[in-house]
Amino acid sequence: PFAVDPRQRELIAAAWTVGTLANLLDHERTASITCFEVAGWKGLFSETAVAHPGFPALTREIFPVYHVFAALGQGTRLRQTHCTPRLAWIHYETMEGADKLLVANLEGNIQPIILRGACRPFRAATLHEGTLAAFRAQENPLPTEPSSSPDLLELPPYAVMFGEFA
């Protein structure tokens, strides 16, 4: 259909959403933000299988952008947001006091991420082409894994990293 963007079910929609929210969340005048429908071709997941060749969604397929909102839905305190043409990040805290970081690569090539002063252990799950199928199949993000080098990470094209400082 005309008003449907097939990128809705792809990584670029999740990365674009992190970039958009990073630009809007830190503004005093932002009272609310509406980005997507809940379900369907313009939503966070599909309700039924779609037989359209440009949008081959499965029944109850979870789109990558769902995980962005699921992660941020845990947030109770915004610490910092930042967006460049290449990377966007949102640093926030949960009700339980967990220190979380959501980072998106806004380009089609690998981007290095340098976490300056990250002396605390860091765990992350990354949504990228290699993990996309697993993320589409479950509502909860994949378990986070400890980072071997917490100061320098590489983010694949249009990937979104869900990180947590210990």
Image: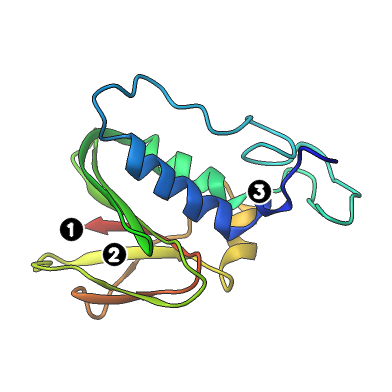
Residue 118 falls in which quadrant of the image? Answer: bottom left
Label 2 neighbourhood size at 10 Å, few (<14), some (14-19), many (20+)? many
Q: In the image, is residue 59 above or below residue 31?
A: below
Q: Which mark is residue 166?
A: 1
Q: Which mark is residue 123?
A: 2
Considering the numbered disc 1 on the image, is that residue within a helix, a strand or a loop?
A: loop
The mark that comes first in sequence, 2 or 1, is 2
Quadrant of the drawing holding the C terminus: bottom left
Residue 155 falls in which quadrant of the image? Answer: bottom left
Label 3 neighbourhood size at 10 Å, few (<14), some (14-19), many (20+)? many
Q: Nearer the viewer, mark 3 or mark 1?
A: 3
Determine the CA span between mark 3 and mark 1: 33 Å
- The type of residue carrying mark 2 is Arg
- CB contact under 8 Å: marks 2 and 1: yes
Q: Which mark is residue 8?
A: 3
**At 63% from the left edge and 30% from the top edge, which residue is drawn?**
38
The mark that comes first in sequence, 3 or 1, is 3
Q: Is residue 113 left or right of residue 34?
A: left
Determine the CA span between mark 2 and mark 3: 27 Å
- The type of residue carrying mark 1 is Ala
Considering the numbered disc 2 on the image, is that residue within a helix, a strand or a loop?
A: strand
The mark that comes first in sequence, 2 or 3, is 3
Q: Is residue 17 left or right of residue 41?
A: left
Q: In the image, is residue 82 above or below residue 74?
A: below
* Relative image position of residue 131 (x, y in whole percent): 56, 68
Q: In the image, is residue 84 above or below residue 77?
A: below
* Relative image position of residue 111 (x, y in whole percent): 37, 74
Residue 150 falls in which quadrant of the image? Answer: bottom left
Considering the numbered disc 3 on the image, is that residue within a helix, a strand or a loop?
A: helix
**At 43% from the left edge and 77% from the top edge, which residue is drawn?**
110
